[in-house]
Image (cartoon, grey):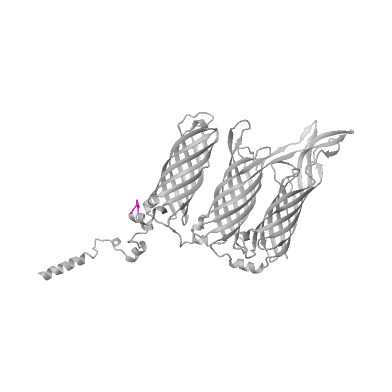
């Protein structure tokens, strides 16, 4: 009996260690699979394998430290408010700080600043504080994964806004609900889009007439660039290479007619120039800071022939009013397709999306003020690799810009807000350098062997157009192309310094209404008429040239493509040209003579600055494009010239 009892005990212990038929395969654990899912510290699960639902398990709390759960953000957006009779909008600037209690729950604090633009009231400045609770639906339903590219959350928030104008202050509490889509752009960097709806207490004193409602509906969307402090997630996906770049572009701008603004823009196109530096911390998201200038035709009017007593006194002519705006631009860049490794390995073309803010001044003919504006802009770049050059790409960039500005009243402290719309399309070149990659590529090394002599002389010839950029009116007869012929001779001393002497001969066509004297029956009479006035301009420039290739780290070789900046002093002289009354003008006498000279004829000093994009076709031959600006110091001269040159260079 003792032996039988011992056998039964051994059998029972054996059965307790064997899975029964009722157990499923999920209950049997593969030790290799389990080892891949634990961190090595007490068999703790990695965060990406936490279960679904409210994942505040002990495993998450131990694997993600408290200081890794913070997230900061910076961004902008659009906010609109409306009630039964009034509406307003603003472009806020937002700063956020969030704390992730778990993969599902988070709290976020937000500070924002904006100027509220009201259609039938005063513009006011405002600052707001907000507290939001976030519930991550993606992590709740699918479980937490540290490598997840996109998550969807909902949030609810409360806040308060302080607004004021001319000493008045008003506090307005509000509440809102919204959704959040967060895209992971690489290690510790993300982008969030947050549409929302809410209710805010009304501010009746901000309107010209009192409102009957106690509240307003608010709506909008925010876009924020996020930085978190979680452990690195994408080390094996080659998404962390950083790139520094510089780019320049030239194109056309088209003002779109605004019913509420001071501009009565026509369909006439103007010109657009931009120059920028940028940085890609990852393959997907980047920043770009640049400056830009646009000139455009804000209105076009046609005046028919003026006939008095059956005689034509003045012919039909067209008047075009020109406007100019300059400013700075800060943008967020996004390369959405670079999430794919195959796309990142493609070196032939790329697509970049951009959006950001502008700040600058603008003015138009007939307006005495230079008006400060704040703008929102968005664009799309389609880039193409430049042949036989790894570090340069050509691109085409359509862009759309909204300008928001205030026009102050001369006799009061009030001001009224307006907005304008501009569409632009530009062509340009981007010069980039992969900071973490090799500085020398196979192609650039081969080019270096061809262009291995850093110091040599060169000569160039070019032809182009010259325009006078002012807030002015132009008339029929002044719309002709102004020819500019340039000859240059210089020397490249080293990788950082090139000097050249440039002689520019240009012909300027203009037309304007001018007083003139004529002799009638021996007496001197004075009339006004349209005069076609041509004159010649001679500019002698001594320029210093710096190749931007060298500035971003390619100074060891002579690159096939070169992007350069040029600047230096200028001696400029205007030479009197042909002056005659426009066809169809009634002279009214003999020997018509202008009362005064339209432009100065003596010489003056000036200063020039240019960008040059040069491509070496052969060892000693290169072609280049060179937009240039020149400022004349004497007031009797037309002050600001823009040249666009295309030319050919031979290096000895």
Q: Which residues are magenta?
A: 52-57
Q: Residue pushed farthest left?
A: 1
Q: Using the rendered view, name the quadrant where residue 432 is placed.
A: bottom right
Residue 96: tell me if it is visible. Answer: yes
**Where residue 166 appears, x then y in whole percent?**
55, 33
Q: Residue pushed farthest right?
A: 522
- Quadrant for the C terminus, please: bottom right
Front in this rendered view, residue 437 or 28: 437
> Can you say whether 412 is above or below 338 in the image?
above
Q: How many marks?
A: 0
The question of residue 162 being in magenta is answered with no
129 relative position to 8: left or right: right
Which residue does the image show at 61% across and 68% down from the upper left? Answer: 445
537 relative position to 288: left or right: right
> Can you say whether 508 is above or below 550 in the image?
above
**Where residue 194 appears, x then y in whole percent?**
46, 46
Which residue does the image show at 61% across and 36% down from the upper left? Answer: 407
> Can you say whether 603 is above or below 280 in the image?
above
Give the main secondary structure of the magenta stretch: loop
283 relative position to 586: left or right: left
**Where residue 563 appears, x then y in whole percent?**
64, 58
């Amino acid at each position: 009996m003792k032996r039988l009892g011992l056998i039964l005990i051994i059998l029972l212990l054996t059965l307790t260690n064997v899975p029964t038929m009722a157990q499923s395969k999920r209950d049997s654990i593969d030790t290799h699979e389990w080892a891949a899912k634990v961190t090595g510290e007490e068999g703790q699960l990695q965060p990406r394998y936490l279960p679904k639902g409210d994942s505040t398990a002990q495993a998450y709390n131990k694997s993600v430290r408290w200081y890794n759960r913070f997230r900061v953000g910076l961004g902008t957006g659009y906010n609109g408010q409306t009630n039964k009779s009034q509406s307003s909008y603003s472009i806020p600037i937002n700063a956020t700080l969030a704390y992730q209690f778990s993969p599902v729950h988070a709290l976020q604090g937000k500070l924002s600043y904006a100027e509220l633009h009201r259609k039938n009231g005063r513009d006011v400045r405002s600052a707001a504080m907000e507290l939001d609770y976030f519930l991550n639906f993606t992590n709740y339903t699918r479980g937490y994964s540290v490598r997840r590219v996109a998550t969807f959350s909902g949030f609810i928030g409360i806040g308060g806004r302080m607004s004021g104008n001319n000493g008045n202050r008003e506090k307005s509490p509000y509440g809102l609900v919204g959704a959040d889509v967060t895209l992971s752009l690489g290690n510790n960097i993300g982008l969030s889009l947050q549409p929302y709806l809410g209710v805010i207490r009304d501010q009746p004193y901000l309107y010209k007439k009192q409102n009957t409602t106690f509240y307003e509906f608010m709506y909008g969307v925010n876009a924020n660039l996020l930085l978190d402090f979680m452990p690195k997630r994408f080390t094996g996906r080659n998404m962390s290479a950083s790139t520094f770049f510089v780019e320049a572009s030239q194109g056309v701008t088209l003002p779109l007619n605004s019913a509420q603004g001071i501009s009565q823009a026509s369909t006439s196109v103007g010109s657009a120039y931009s120059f920028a530096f940028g940085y890609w911390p990852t393959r997907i998201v980047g920043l770009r800071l640049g400056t830009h200038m646009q000139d455009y035709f804000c209105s076009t009017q046609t005046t028919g022939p003026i006939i008095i007593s059956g005689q034509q006194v003045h012919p039909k002519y067209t008047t075009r009013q020109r406007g100019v705006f300059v400013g700075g631009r800060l943008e967020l860049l996004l390369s959405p397709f670079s999430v794919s490794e195959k796309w990142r390995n493609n070196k032939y073309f790329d697509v970049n999306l951009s959006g950001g803010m502008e700040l600058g001044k603008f003015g138009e003919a007939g307006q005495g003020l230079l008006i400060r504006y704040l703008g929102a802009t968005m664009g799309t770049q389609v880039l193409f690799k430049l042949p036989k050059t790894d570090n340069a790409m050509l691109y085409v960039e359509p862009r759309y810009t909204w300008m928001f500005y205030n026009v102050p009243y001369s006799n009061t402290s009030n001001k009224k807000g307006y907005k304008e719309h501009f569409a632009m399309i530009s062509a340009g070149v981007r010069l980039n350098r992969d900071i973490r990659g090799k500085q020398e590529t196979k192609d650039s090394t081969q080019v270096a062997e061809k262009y291995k002599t850093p110091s040599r002389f060169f000569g160039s010839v070019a032809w182009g157009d010259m325009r006078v950029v002012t807030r002015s009116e132009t008339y029929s007869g002044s719309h002709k192309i102004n020819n500019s012929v340039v000859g240059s001779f210089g020397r490249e001393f080293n990788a950082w310094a090139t000097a050249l002497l440039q002689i520019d001969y240009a012909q300027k066509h203009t037309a304007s209404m001018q007083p003139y004297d004529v002799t009638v029956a021996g007496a001197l009479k004075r009339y006004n008429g349209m005069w076609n006035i041509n004159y010649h301009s001679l500019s002698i420039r001594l320029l210093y040239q710096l190749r931007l290739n060298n500035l971003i780290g390619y100074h060891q070789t002579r690159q096939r493509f070169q992007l350069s900046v040029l600047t230096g002093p200028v001696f400029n002289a205007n030479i009197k040209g042909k002056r005659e009354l426009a066809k169809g003008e009634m002279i009214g006498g003999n020997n018509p003579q202008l009362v005064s000279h339209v432009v100065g004829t003596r010489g003056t000093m000036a200063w020039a600055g240019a960008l040059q994009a040069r491509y070496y076709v052969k060892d000693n031959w290169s072609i280049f494009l060179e937009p240039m600006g020149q400022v004349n110091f004497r007031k009797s001269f037309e002050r600001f010239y823009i040249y666009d040159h295309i030319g050919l260079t031979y290096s000895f």
